[in-house]
Image (spheres, rainbow, N blue to C red):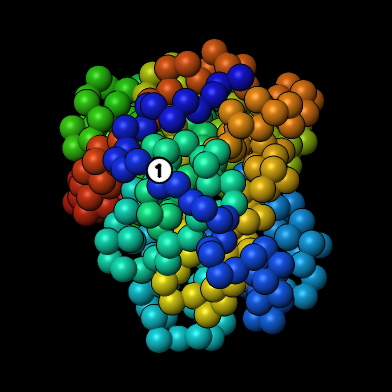
């Protein structure tokens, strides 16, 4: 089983010691009471088939039935989530998100804009230092690697690496699971394609990735729609580039109709950490804090594993014997992850800036 060591991200900032989980003036009982009084939590961009979110949300509702969960735009990207905070600074209504779940590079940038509220969960010390902001403005929660999901009814010989996607037999076949101008998942897919060419992580890989997708589009292999298991099953997008946990969950959902194969490419294996954060303008700040406590509890973290994600507290859970073996047995073999690269914040920021701004000019395919 692949383990997160906290060394390969190369983020900045050391962890701060916290004397209490929730703050010196507020106990867990007080937090629950205050959150129930608010009566609502507004989330955004949490599709139920992503990383086991359906069950994670259901378990929160079951634990706190007094709190209504208002779910905004499940198919939004990380950039859309941050924009929703910006657009609703003065709005305490139903369109103002309390919490966000975004790609790693979006955490520091949102903090820099003053859009986030610091908060340290009770399990703070078991989150690797390199996967969290030292002041508690954002914190990694789960991660996976990019993979190809293949409709085996339509594609007999699955692509084994990024370069294979350029082959003529994959005409009108390859789709991203998001818009590279806004979706972290899609941005990282372009970056990964660039890394597979031998380019260095960051701006170089961003340029190489854009050039790769330019060729893919020119060859007629790229399908400019946001791919999902449903579009794969329908034959609209026979090859879907997606995080491994989304593809594995999609495989289960399709249940063999059609048969699928999940391929982790031979090169350009990019792992992505997603982070949680609370809006600085959250209409329901206590419910938001309680949500974070739920996500970072043992129950919440094991919920990610059920959804084929690697929980950020995996090492701590494994050390304490809290992970059921049957869950580990459903994950891809550890060997598939051994070459995974975790781009640093600086590298991600450089590639994100380039890809989001240059996609239209270089690739010329509007993904919708």
Q: Quadrant of residue 302?
A: top right
Q: Is residue 19 visible?
A: yes
Question: Is residue 351 among what the camera can see?
Answer: no
Residue named by callout 1? 15
Q: Residue at x 53, y 17 (%)?
A: 336
Please, which residue is most extreme toward the top here? 335
* Nearer to the camera, 135 or 304: 135
From the top left corner, tell me how far across and down residue 62 is, in percent. 81, 62
Residue 34 in the image, given as x and y percentages of width and height: 66, 77
Q: Residue at x 59, y 52 (%)?
A: 122
Quarter that holds the C terminus: bottom left
Q: Which quadrant holds the N terminus?
A: top right
The front one of 174 and 181 is 181
Q: How many marks?
A: 1
Q: Is residue 113 left or right of residue 156?
A: left
Q: Would you place residue 346 above or below residue 46 in this image?
A: above
- Estimate the x, y position of residue 141 in percent, counting from the top left: 53, 45
Residue 60: name its quadrant.
bottom right
Residue 267 falls left or right of residue 275: left
**What residue is drawn where x is 73% and y is 26%?**
321
Instruction: Establish if 312 lies above or below 336.
Output: below
Q: Quadrant of residue 14?
A: top left
Q: Nearer the viewer, residue 238 or 208?
A: 208
Using residue 106 as the reference point, say whether residue 32 is left or right of it.
right
Coordinates of residue 283 in the picture (x, y in percent): 52, 80
Q: In the figure, is residue 50 to the left or right of 189? A: right
- What is the secondary structure assignment of the residue under circle 1? loop
Q: Residue at x 48, y 64 (%)?
A: 278
Q: Nearer the viewer, residue 129 or 236?
A: 129
Q: Residues within 10 Å of mark 1 (few under 14, many from 20)?
A: some
């Amino acid at each position: 089983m692949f383990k997160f060591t906290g060394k390969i991200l190369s983020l900045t900032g050391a962890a701060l010691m916290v004397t209490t989980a929730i703050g010196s003036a507020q106990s867990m009982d007080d937090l629950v009471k205050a959150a129930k009084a608010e009566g609502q939590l507004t989330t955004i961009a949490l599709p139920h088939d992503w990383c086991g979110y359906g069950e994670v949300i259901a378990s929160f509702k079951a634990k706190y039935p007094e709190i209504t969960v208002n779910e905004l735009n499940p198919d939004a990207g990380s950039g859309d989530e941050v924009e929703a905070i910006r657009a609703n600074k003065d709005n305490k209504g139903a369109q103002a998100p309390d919490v966000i779940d975004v790609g790693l590079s979006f955490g520091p940038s949102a903090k820099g804009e003053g859009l986030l509220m610091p908060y340290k969960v009770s399990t703070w010390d078991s989150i690797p230092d390199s996967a969290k902001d030292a002041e508690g403005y954002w914190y990694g929660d789960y991660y996976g690697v990019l993979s190809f999901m293949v409709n085996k009814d339509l594609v007999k010989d699955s692509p084994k690496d990024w370069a294979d996607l350029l082959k003529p037999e994959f005409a009108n076949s390859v789709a991203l699971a998001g818009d590279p101008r806004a979706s972290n998942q899609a941005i990282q897919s372009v970056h990964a394609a660039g890394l597979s060419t031998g380019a260095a992580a960051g701006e170089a890989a961003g340029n190489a990735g854009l050039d790769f997708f330019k060729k893919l589009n020119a060859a007629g292999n790229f399908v400019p729609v946001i791919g999902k298991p449903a579009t794969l099953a329908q034959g609209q997008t026979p090859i879907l580039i997606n995080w491994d946990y989304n593809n594995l969950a999609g495989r289960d959902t399709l249940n063999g109709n059609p048969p699928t194969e999940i391929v982790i490419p031979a090169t350009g294996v990019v792992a992505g950490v997603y982070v949680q954060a609370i809006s600085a303008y959250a209409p329901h700040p206590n419910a938001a804090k309680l949500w974070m406590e739920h996500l970072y509890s043992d129950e919440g973290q094991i919920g990610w594993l059920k959804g084929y994600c690697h929980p950020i507290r995996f090492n701590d859970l494994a050390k304490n014997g809290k992970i059921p073996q049957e869950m580990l047995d459903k994950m891809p073999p550890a060997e598939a992850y051994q070459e995974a690269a975790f781009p640093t914040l600086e590298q991600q920021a450089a590639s994100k800036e380039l890809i989001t701004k240059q996609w239209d000019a270089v690739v010329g395919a509007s993904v919708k």
